[in-house]
Image (spheres, grey):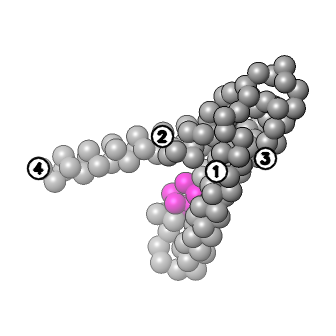
């Protein structure tokens, strides 16, 4: 009986973590796309959010697909893709951190035409780097 309760709690935690991951990744892609031209001081930040969010979503989908496959060619391809995307995501996270912290603290006042960054865009990026 205790094993079933632990299994149920484990599955519930995994489902909640997956939901949170999906929400954060979709939000990153959405904010990057919506505010694409609203960070002239560092125009790579919206691109960073779009790419890191898309890579994370693809990684989640590949992980789900990999769990449905039995041993074989497609499972090996899936594992290779997950590995490559994971390495890319780590490198991309480091690159994005350099872009973010190069303008720390940013100017959120949009009246400064070329020296500002949209606040929700910068805060989302800053939070993703701390996670």
Of circles 4 and 1, which is in front? 1
> Which residue does the numbered mark 3 point to in the structure image?
44
> Element at badge 2?
helix
Place residue 39 in its image quadrant: top right
Q: Is residue 28 found left or right of 6 in the rendered image? A: right
Image height check: is 121 above or below 60? Answer: above
How would you classify the magenta stretch by its main secondary structure?
helix
For disc 4, the marked residue is 1
- In the image, is 38 to the left or to the right of 99? right
Q: Which residues are magenta?
A: 58-65
Give the mark nearest the N terminus, 4 or 2. 4
Considering only order in the chain, which callout, 1 or 4, is on the residue closer to the N terminus? Answer: 4
Residue 19's tag is 2
Q: Position of residue 99 (x, y in %)?
A: 71, 49
Residue at image location 48% in from the left, 40% down from the top: 19
Which dot, 1 or 3, sits closer to the camera? 1
Give how far apart the Cα atoms at labels 4 and 2 are.
27 Å
Marks 3 and 4 close (CB-CB < 8 Å): no
Name the residue: 66% across, 28% down: 120
In-front residue for pair 121/41: 41
Earlier in the chain: of badge 1 and badge 3, it is 3
Whole-angstrom CA distance, mark 1 to mark 2, is 25 Å
First of labels 3, 4 by sequence position: 4
Residue 47: image x %, image y %? Answer: 77, 46
Q: Nearer the viewer, mark 1 or mark 2?
A: 1
Residue at image location 71% in from the left, 33% down from the top: 106
Q: Which mark is residue 97?
A: 1
């Amino acid at each position: 009986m205790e094993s079933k309760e632990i299994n149920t709690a484990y599955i519930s935690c995994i489902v909640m973590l997956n939901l949170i991951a999906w929400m954060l990744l979709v939000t990153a892609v959405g904010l990057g796309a919506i505010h694409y031209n609203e960070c002239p001081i560092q125009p790579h930040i919206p691109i960073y959010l779009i790419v890191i969010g898309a890579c994370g979503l693809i990684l989640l989908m590949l992980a789900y697909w990999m769990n449905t496959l039995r041993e074989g060619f497609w499972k090996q391809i899936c594992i290779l893709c997950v590995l490559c995307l994971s390495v890319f995501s780590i490198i991309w996270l480091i690159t994005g951190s350099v872009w973010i912290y190069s303008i720390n603290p940013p100017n959120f006042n949009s009246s400064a035409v070329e020296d500002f960054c949209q606040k929700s865009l910068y805060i989302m990026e800053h939070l993703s780097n701390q996670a």
